[in-house]
Amino acid sequence: DTGKVWINKQQCFTNVPRGAYDFYIGGYQPLQKWLKDRKGRNLDFKDILHYQRMVHSITLTIDLMKEIDEYYN
């Protein structure tokens, strides 16, 4: 499942896996928190690239966690 994460009425990030968006680290959801912390700001290219890298990193983390679980179960 991939979807869109809307940052305003006209702009969104696409192809964000639901699992990555809902992923928790230490009691918070990093993809949601990062955007909330920047509410009201214009995201520049560096910010957009950083968010995309976060999505990618969390997706890889989820895949590794599944692989580890398969190995130890």
Image: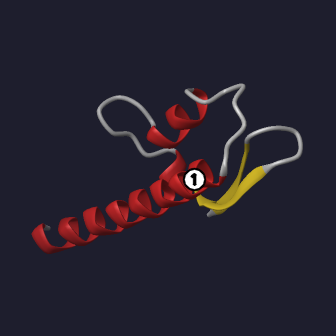
Figure label count: 1
10 on left or right of 4: right
Q: Residue at x 58, y 48 (%)?
A: 47
Where residue 35 appears, x then y in whole percent? 59, 36
In the rendered structure, which amino acid carries the disc numbered 1?
A: Lys
Would residue 19 be visible to someone looking at this image? no
Where residue 66 appears, x then y in whole percent? 29, 66
32 on left or right of 62: right
Q: Residue at x 54, y 51 (%)?
A: 51
Q: Dot 1: within a 10 Å radius of its alpha carbon, few (fewer than 14), some, or many (20 or more) residues?
A: few
Where residue 56 appears, x then y in whole percent? 47, 64
Would residue 44 be visible to someone looking at this image? yes
Q: Residue at x 36, y 61 (%)?
A: 62
Q: Residue at x 81, y 48 (%)?
A: 11
| Residue linked to disc 1 | 46
Q: Quadrant of the C terminus?
A: bottom left
Q: Which residue is more in the foreground, 48 or 9?
A: 48
Q: Secondary structure at mark 1?
A: helix
Q: Quadrant of residue 18?
A: bottom right
